[in-house]
Amino acid sequence: MTIRFENTLRISLFTLGFSSLATQVFLIRECFSVLNGNELVIGIVMANWMLLTGAGAFMGRFFGRMKGKIPFLLFLQFLFSLLPMLMMLKLDLWKAISLPSGSVPGLIPVIRSMFLFQLPFCLLNGFLFVAYVHELSGITGKNASSGSYAIESVGGMFAGLLVNIFILKFSGMFVGLHILLIINLLVCLLFSITCGIRPQRIIMIPVCLIFMVFPFFADLDTYTGKLFYPAQKLIFHKNTPYGKLDVTMNAGQLNYFENGLLLFSSNNEIVNEESVHFAMIQHPGPKKILLISGGISGTLREILKYHPERIDYVELDPGLIKLGRKYSKILDDERIHVIQGDARRFIRQTKEKYDVVLVNLPEPSTLLINRFYSREFLMELKNVFTPGAVISESLPSTSDYVSKTAAITNSTLVQTLKTQFKNVLILPGQRNYFLASDNSLSPKIAVLIAGRGISNLYVNSWYLDENSLKERSEYIHSHLDINAKVNSDFKPVAFFQQLHYWTSMFEWNILAAGIVILVMLFLVVFSLNRISLGLFTGGFTASSLQMLILISFQIIYGYVFLATGIILALFMAGLALGAFSFKRMIPVPTEKKYIHIQVSLALFSIGFPFIILALNLPGMPVIMVYVVFLLLTLVLSFITGLEFSLASALGSKEITLKMSSNYSADLFGSAIGAIVTTLILLPFLGIVTSSLILVAMNLFSAGFLFFRQKIL
């Protein structure tokens, strides 16, 4: 029975890692959809996750003193099984009930709510890990920390692969959560059978079976989807590898949503005409057009008024293309070539040359979108431009009032456009349209439209007052800062400005938040011993670089949803390899070797930004980008797993106490690293300076340990 229970504990550890990472991927994806999130949301989720899991691990030090440990552990396992689905339901219901349709939650409510939603699951996650290590060490009679860490990491690796490749691709989130529920309840049954306590076995079998069957009778995915669109009829709902697509109908109008954000609505002729004609009319004879996103909203119909030879329409999400074919016949036109994929990669590979490029995207509120407002993007575009070609981008309208934050964002875009084009013109309408070209640009839109004989409902002499248009354009130009920073891929100032604009709408001071985080950082650091300080620094570094890997993949490849599970799975695989290889690589654990590992993290941090910047160079093969990202993830996590295993072998504390201290220090460092990197380091300092700060932290930690070792 002891041997069987020992194996059950290992299965429980594997399932713990599997459930933890699967739930993390589901939660990040759902937060993007429900909270209209940007990359800051990933940082918030991961920071909360590691902070609360670390707190649970810290509480786990008291497990060894408890009476009735096995029944209590079984109860916690059962509770842990139910929490992933309950957490997602609470998140969806909170959004539907607490926030009016179309509203954007403030940063403080997001942080507070995500903290509360994650609290039960993450506390149990950390506590259960320490409890399993305690029980396994007691049965085997030796320190099971390193092996347990490896088993849990392998479980996380399998979760990342299965969730990303199969569950999210072929089913909805709640189907995946139901599968996760069944797996955890089966482990509960196994635990109750092998633990040797009969009453628990009698109770758990019928209870687990009931909870396994219950979700089959509820279509939770469709139910929660309908909650988000009150007074609208949900006529289409589908999960894709890129997020959630919804189409609603209201008074005959179709509204297209992606991840909860309204992309466009049918019959919105004003926006369709302005987004096309303001730019198209600037070119004397546009023959080849590149349209980036939004083609099925009606813009393609407007472009066809110029009788072009070819329109290349690029859309990232294939689900949107399918919707376009389902609800419109415009894509059947032989002049329109639909390309599914990332527009930047398409631009790097295409042999076509374009007269007009229309970037029909929202403002740079995420790093995914920011990369279409960057200097690097414009440089790539110049390679596919004909002489005198025109580009159009847009930001929210400021024609009546230019706030300080809006003025900075507008100024940044203008200065970025000027790095590549001689002339930049802002035309205010439903949005601010930024036109750029090496040829002259004219604000006399109505005259040009009339001269070309194009028939429009709104963009014509009857609708447009050219004097007013010119005055409003000059008004916006007068508020521009000629010294504004240029936006780039890896120093995304436009994204940060949008982030600042979002937080400025609510009672939130980003400087005060930074000070609070720094104070917390110093308090935690000075409370650690020399071994746990190394784990804290290692966790901070690993988490920061993991965030930079995810963000860099987003910038270079185009969409992090496709890679989140794979990258996290590889990270867990590297942790497991590091833990499994520990005894072979370091048969005699010493503090000197611990210092070597911290120096290795510093060296990795030095080379990291230059490798990433090289991957973003034009002409870099896609397969090489994939391979290098995978290797970076694997090497980083291997060093981290090795460091944790070595730290667990050093010192003379009781196993449970040592495991609790080490695991919580590692996770606390990871939590602070995730939020600091996302909120402060990358937006303010860029990828190179951020990495150099990580170098300094690891050298400081290694130096501190070295001098303490000399003194002692």
Image: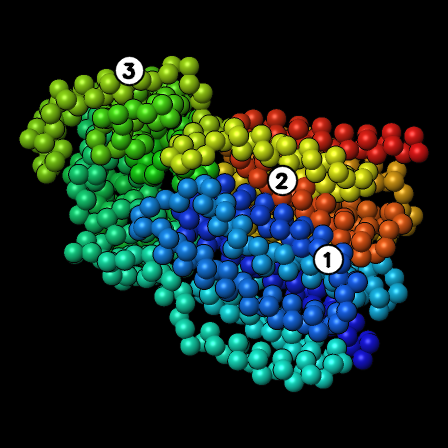
499 or 467, which lies in front? 499
- For image coordinates 58% across by 48% down, the residue present is 48
Image spot of residue 636 (x, y percent): 69, 43
**Residue position marked by numbered label 3 in the rendering:** 478
Image spot of residue 107 (x, y percent): 45, 41
Q: Mark 1 or mark 3, which is nearer the start of the sequence?
A: 1
Is residue 461 toward the left or the right of residue 229 in the image? left
Label 3 secondary element: helix
**Residue position marked by numbered label 1 in the rendering:** 60
The CA distance from mark 2 to mark 1 is: 21 Å
**Label 1 sits on what residue type?**
Gly
546 or 99, which lies in front? 99
Q: Mark 1 or mark 2, which is nearer the start of the sequence?
A: 1
Q: Are marks 2 and 3 in contact (CB under 8 Å)?
A: no
- For image coordinates 61% across by 26% down, the residue present is 689
Residue 71 in view in this figure: yes
Image spot of residue 227 (x, y percent): 33, 60
Q: Which mark is residue 672?
A: 2
420 or 41, which lies in front? 41
Label 3 crowd bin: few (<14), some (14–19), many (20+), radius 10 Å: few
Q: Mark 3 or mark 2, which is nearer the start of the sequence?
A: 3
